[in-house]
Image (spheres, grey):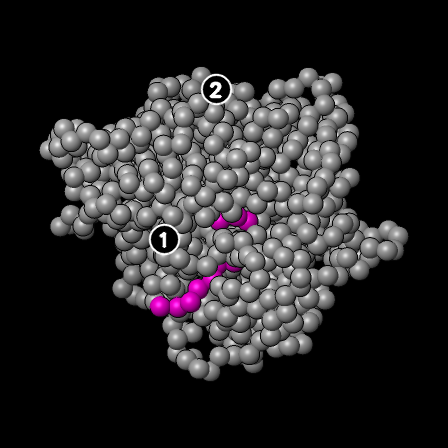
Amino acid sequence: MGYDLKMRIWRGDADGGDLGDFTVAVEEGEVVLDAIHRIQATQAGDLAVRWNCKAGKCGSCSAEVNGRPRLMCMTRLSDFEESETITVTPVRTFPVIRDLVTDVSYNYEKAKQVPAFAPTPRDPDGKRRMMQEDVERGQEFRKCIECFLCQDVCHVIRDHEDNKPAFAGPRFFLRYAELDMHPLDTNDRRKLAQEAAGIGMCNITKCCTEVCPENIHITDNAIIPMKERVADRKYDPVVWLGSKIFRRGDPAARTEV
Amino acid sequence: MDSTGSRHPMTGNRMDPAEEVGPHGFETHEYDVVVIGAGGAGLRAAIAAHDAGARVAIVCKSLLGKAHTVMAEGGIAAAMGNVYADDNWQVHFRDTMRGGKMLNNWRMAQLHAQEAPERVLELEEWGALFDRTKDGLISQRDFGGHRYARLAHVGDRTGLEMIRTLQQRAVALGIDVFMECTVTKVFRDGGRVSGAFGYWRETGRFVVFSTPSVVLATGGIGKSYQVTSNSWEYTGDGHALAMRTGASLINMEFVQFHPTGMVWPPSVKGILVTESVRGDGGILRNSEGERFMFNYIPEYFKSETADTIEEAEGWYEDKKKNRRPPELLPRDEVARAINSEIKAGRGSPHGGVFLDIASRRSAEFIRRRLPSMYHQFKELADVDITAEPMEVGPTCHYVMGGVEVDADTEQSLVEGLYAAGEVAGGMHGSNRLGGNSLSDLLVFGRRAGHNAAYNAQKLSGNRPEVPEDEVKAAAEAALAPFANLEGEGGENPYTIQKDLQEVMQRLVGIIRKEDELRESLVEIERLKERAKHLRVEGHRQYNPGWHLALDLANMLVVSECIAKAALERQESRGGHTRDDFPGPDPEWGAKNLVLTLDGESVQLKHQPLPTMPDELKPLFEEA
């Protein structure tokens, strides 16, 4: 069942680079990362690539496969014709370090800017109680494996370096939404989401949702509700008052940070 | 972090081309505690050390949040009693000791069982969103070897939840993280730890840490096997660093083969299929459709295992009246049973057995409880686990052996050198129960971090010195694989790694024999010889070939330890099965094998097991 696969892989560093041609023997059931590893083991020992789990759980091996942002470990060769050349390039939104490895520190910087979870005190028996239906929204967002493909594909920062300082990106809108929907959190980050994280710059084209390997409904379940919550805070005293009265201590019991 | 040069705000890497010269000839940082590894144990240790007032650095080979903990699926074992009020630390302690065939360090098992519940609640305090019971408490699920439903979980992605929670906590506390930075040497000044040496993977530049406390939290050794659930990082770094620093390893003969790894397609062979599938009702069948685990109930677990299908089925609903299904025996038992079925010719088409939950639970239930498994099989194997059985087989998953530590402080034989998590030994005895790993990381990560901070604090001004000559030697050793660059020939590190994996899989696998173990030691010796002539291409910037060349030295010494200890222990117990010594032997049951390094040579000695105090013994006397 094996065949010789033709690949073009971008090789280079911050100073520039080129697509290199490789031919590699591949087997049935393999994924793009298998082919890359075989090239590394037999033809180019110094081919730089990030990976860890090889099972779609750690989000390390993000790259652009034939121009589409993908996890290389979850991109099966059987999705392509055997005669097709597969081109792998580094994710475009972040600066190249070497070959397929990019500098994703932008994301770690943005992570530092989200104020931490600040829970209400424990119940008298030392435990905390939350209902399953109340944690499920946050659980969806916490499926995020931080592959940063949503960040890579986001129009606001892809090819717009100048927007990066004022925009946290879909991955972190998930985080803001998760905390805002957490039944026990006491921080109100809506002002920050609007001002420091720039959620208003998102024009909900849903590109992030399309590429999410965890199938998180980033736009519909996180960004749009978060935009609404931010808008509530800003413009609508009636909604704001209603939320104060009817939403289980949320966000009325919260303190703006 | 110091402010010289232009740096990555997060990775701390120098971005300008000039070589930085610190006090030791290289970039140098001073800390109270340096934690090596950023999985569950490393992050928890760093948080504890920070909370104790220490200046802490985390140094890790991958990006933050990508460590192997992220792959843990089933849950965190902790006797919180949320589902079964009868559960308590004594029952958890007993299960753990029996699962480890009584070879565990009793004190570690006790501390673990006592402290795990609070460690789980702490994660919730830091933002973890566990699945809930009907009353809104943290839900707990069934797992092999645990008497009660005990695993706090989030679907089947508990490890991701844990690492993200700890990562977010560490970031919130402002702990320095040196990402994609590999430590190759721990320094001593006289008898105590004084620092560490490493390289930035991104630039290939060297970095020196001056610190009186080092916490090893580097995980396991699985990458020395062909079929493994472990990631590239699992090259036994901490095990090897500890030995070279003068510390000892124990229990290295005990390697856990998880009974259920994927077997097809070949590219995913070894990837983990969580035990939760069985905890949630999945059963094992052979090619004849037989539920074969009933044929493999060992004497030792007879009193607590159902011997009829009726009783096993009744257990899911009523755990008081019925005993546990044999599919939920400890992992060593299930892995051996699967191995026997396959060898007897009753395997599945791709050389595994069938794991069936499709015919036993609704599609909705399966997708809700096991979303990652559903996704993994659908995407990688074209198998819909709600409609058809999975094919599974044993995969190298975990090493019970590790650095010998003091149970209360996690300090090794070397002052200032600590170990926690998979890299530490003793806690799990000869076999680890599922779910006891994540709790281990939290309980002992915290203890190690705390004690490492205290160790630094009590020194006050008397910090040990980083020895200049050893810094130079460490740099030379790290560059050695480039030395052959001009010459002809030379060994490819990827080829040696592949050959080592083949040797370990074939000769030091699930079932072992004296002649094969002897052969493995000869083979490892040959590989060590070949590894002296490694040759890597390219330059120092993000060069995986070079990185592997350096990791290989660790894999080789750790593999030698496993093979040597496996040859020595003439009995079968937990994760060590000898074809030529099929049963357990009480004399061996009272001993640990201790491994140390004398120069380049691995030394082995016998050591009596720590004795359990009388007041704990009654827990093991009931029927």
Q: Chain of mark 1?
A: B
User: Which residue is at 36% across, 57% downward?
Assistant: B173
Q: Dot 1, how many residues are within 10 Å of its Cα: few (below 14), some (14-19), or many (20+)?
A: some
First in sequence, mark 2 or 1: give its number.
1
Q: Chain of mark 2?
A: B
Q: Residue B464 in the image: state x and y as whole percent.
A: 52, 79
Nearer to the camera, A98 or B219: A98
Nearer to the camera, B618 or B255: B255
Drawn side of residue A90 relative to residue A108, left or right:
right
Q: Is residue A213 above or below residue B174?
A: above
Q: Residue B462 in the image: state x and y as whole percent.
A: 46, 82
Question: Which picture quadrant has residue B227?
Answer: top right
Q: Main secondary structure of the magenta part?
A: loop
Q: Dot 2, how many residues are within 10 Å of its Cα: few (below 14), some (14-19), or many (20+)?
A: some
User: Which residue is at 68% across, 38% downward?
Assistant: A37
Residue for badge 2: B384
Residue A228 appears anywhere in the view: yes
Q: Disc 2, disc 1: CB below 8 Å?
A: no
Q: CA distance from mark 2 to mark 1?
A: 40 Å
Give the residue type that dot 1 points to. Ala
Query: From the viewer's perspective, is the residue at label 2 or at label 1 nearer?
Result: 1
Residue B133 lies in the magenta stretch: no
Residue for badge 1: B172
Q: Quadrant of the N terminus of chain A?
A: top right
Q: Which residues are magenta?
A: B53-68
Give the residue type that dot 2 points to. Asp
User: Which residue is at 71% across, 19% downward?
Assistant: A84
Drawn side of residue B219 relative to residue B600, left or right:
left
